[in-house]
Amino acid sequence: MTRFETISNITAQLERASDEVLVAVAEQLEAALDPIRQLTARELALVEQSKADFAHGRAYTRAEAEAHVERRLEEARLARAAE
């Protein structure tokens, strides 16, 4: 499909879309065109916490990090299986 055909197809579909769908499409397009977004307050706090942890020597080795992730994934798998 050519760029022109794609744009024509999208335009035709947008005319039938509800307001909610239009908002969702606009948000998706905006995110796709601007992949670098601002961090949330929680994400910024986690970055600062990580910096402080590292500065105080509180950091995992690669093996410790992998073991931690594997434990958490296994816990999640078991929780899903129990549902």
Image: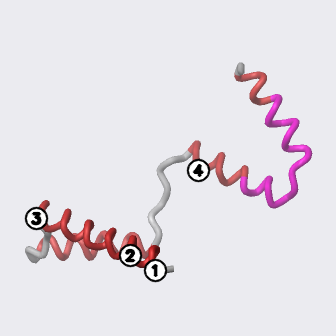
Disc 3 residue crowd, few under 14, some 14–19, many 20+, Cα 10 Å: few
CB atoms at circles 3 and 4 under 8 Å apart? no
Which numbered circle lies on residue 82?
1
User: Which three-letter amino acid code belongs to the residue tagged 2?
Assistant: Leu
- Separation (CA) of disc 2 from disc 3: 26 Å
- Magenta-span inclusion, residue 70: no
- Separation (CA) of disc 2 from disc 4: 34 Å
User: Which three-letter amino acid code belongs to the residue tagged 1?
Assistant: Ala
- Magenta-span inclusion, residue 10: yes
Q: Residue furthest top?
A: 2
**For residue 39, which quarter of the picture?**
bottom left
* Element on which disc 3 rests: loop
Q: Which residue is mark 3?
A: 61
Q: Earlier in the sequence, mark 1 or mark 3?
A: 3
Q: Examine the rendered structure and indicate whether residue 14 appears above or below residue 76.
A: above
Q: Is residue 31 left or right of residue 49?
A: right
The stretch in magenta equals 8-24
Which numbered circle lies on residue 31?
4
In front: mark 2 or mark 4?
2
Q: Is residue 5 left or right of residue 82?
A: right
